[in-house]
Image (cartoon, rainbow, N blue to C red):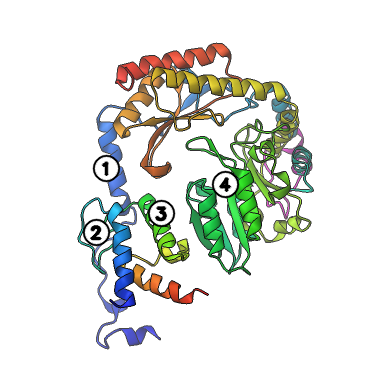
Amino acid sequence: MSERDDIFARVAAQIEPFNRKGVDVTEATGFQRDLEWDSLTVMDFVAAIEDEFDITITMNMQADIDTVGQLVDAVERLKGARP
Amino acid sequence: MTDQLDQPDDVNLADLPTPPGTHDLLAKFQPLIREREALLATGVRDPFAIVMTEVKSPTRAIIDGRDTILLGTYNYMGMTFDPDVVAAGKDALDRFGSGTTGSRVLNGTYHPHKDVEEALRDFYGTSSAIVFSTGYQANLGVISTLAGKGDYIILDADSHASIYDGCWLGNAEVVRFRHNSVDDLDRRLGRLPKEAGKLVVLEGVYSMFGDVAPLPEMVKVAKKHGAMVLCDEAHGMGFFGANGRGVYEELGCEADIDFVVGTFSKSVGTVGGFCVSNHPDFEVLRLVCRPYVFTASLPPSVVATAAASIRKLKNAADKRAHLWKNSRRLHAGLRELGFTIATETAQSAIIAVMMPEQETTVALWQALLEGGLYVNMARPPATPAGTFLLRCSLCAEHSDEEVGQILRIFEDAGRAVGCIA
């Protein structure tokens, strides 16, 4: 499993408790469009991702993350940037 | 990379024909418009369109020709009809006219503006006080100016809209922590670059559930990570602490809060906002804070009423005691009737009744109004965790008899709607 696959698997696992519609999660899945999350769910999910990977996803960055794939990209980048 | 490289040679979006008609920018609000129409079609009245035709006192008004007890005003200390406060406003109106027509930094600073800032410095025991035209603008201005590019703002997830908007107005990086969680704040601060400037934004009382922040523990964590702390005491001023400064005074963390933001539109009983601080360079904000500079100052009568009210609030220990008695009695009484309250105990003068969904919430709200009681209805997204609330805020001027009446109205309305047995 590549590091990216590993990140995707961990992100997908964090999505599950919030995946009330039982959407099949792929890189193209949209948080708002497909999972239909409101801003409060997004807040809880982002906090869970931050704690899972020990990273900071600022609200500024969140504005540019619409899909699971974009989030995996961001996590990969943020993990690499960490001291 | 230029735009040209991203587009095929033969397509230039600007050359495409414009669709016929005007693109209606309000179309995106259709879902909300339809939801409201559907709600109002069930026969309930609009909870966001109340008109008070006469206001008799801090606790009474005429709504639809009916004498109504006000239990949703944030007029905690009941200063709006205080004779000294009203007299100060009338006097300033006579002496200084109806408005300043100018910015504080140009032609908009009159003696009453300096006087209310002196009253604030005295009330808070600080070296500086800056008055803004609203509490919203105080947060907007102070937060966006303090935290600049490369700095971090760390805020509670349940923060007021004015705090969020202060973040958007500035250029700082914004990080949220889970509501009132000291560990979550600690973890998030620990992940940020050590050398970066950090502003932790807290509130003494969170206005939706009326719960209080664990300020001593949060301030300790913030200081450990080298952050400055701003505390919004909009819902704490007047009745927390020996001098009525707020929750931070009551919990003994005055030495560690760098900036206190507050409002004149709750306990003070008029409109306006402020920030007080002991920072030696705080006054520079008057020159660099856009929501302070680029707006007209408050009318002189407004700041004169605020100054008179603040000076009286300092010595209002009896009123504080009565307000707390009212709040505890309402909390206990509503629980006894079978309502669910957002907090285990009465933590502030806000008692939030938790409701199941929108229809029952509006039905109970309307039954209360028809029974002669006005409370605030709150719904997502203003509320945390998708909850519907009927929010009650008590006043020091509610008499013991009125609190009894309020409980009876809740009992009758609750039974009629079927919320309680």
Q: What stretch of residues is rendered in magenta?
A: B93-113
Q: Do labels 3 and 2 share a chain?
A: yes
Image mark 3: chain = A
Mark 3 vs mark 2, CA separation in Å: 17 Å
What residue lies at 45% left-to-right and 76% top-to-bottom?
A: A80
Residue at x 77%, y 38% (from the top left corner): B119
Residue that mark 2 sits on: A34
The residue type indicated by label 4 comes to Tyr
Could you confirm whether marks 4 and 2 are on the same chain? Answer: no
Q: Which chain contains the residue that carries disc 1?
A: B
Q: Going 43% across and 43% down the picture, which residue do you hit?
A: B382
Q: Mark 2 lies on which chain?
A: A
**Badge 3, how many Cα within 10 Å: few under 14, some, many 20+?**
some
**Badge 3 is on which residue?**
A43
How far apart are the alpha carbons under marks 3 and 4?
23 Å
SS label for mark 3: helix
Quadrant where the N terminus of chain B sits is bottom left
- State the image coordinates of residue B163 (x, y, percent, origin top left): 54, 51
Task: From the viewer's side, name the closer residue of B340 and B390.
Answer: B340
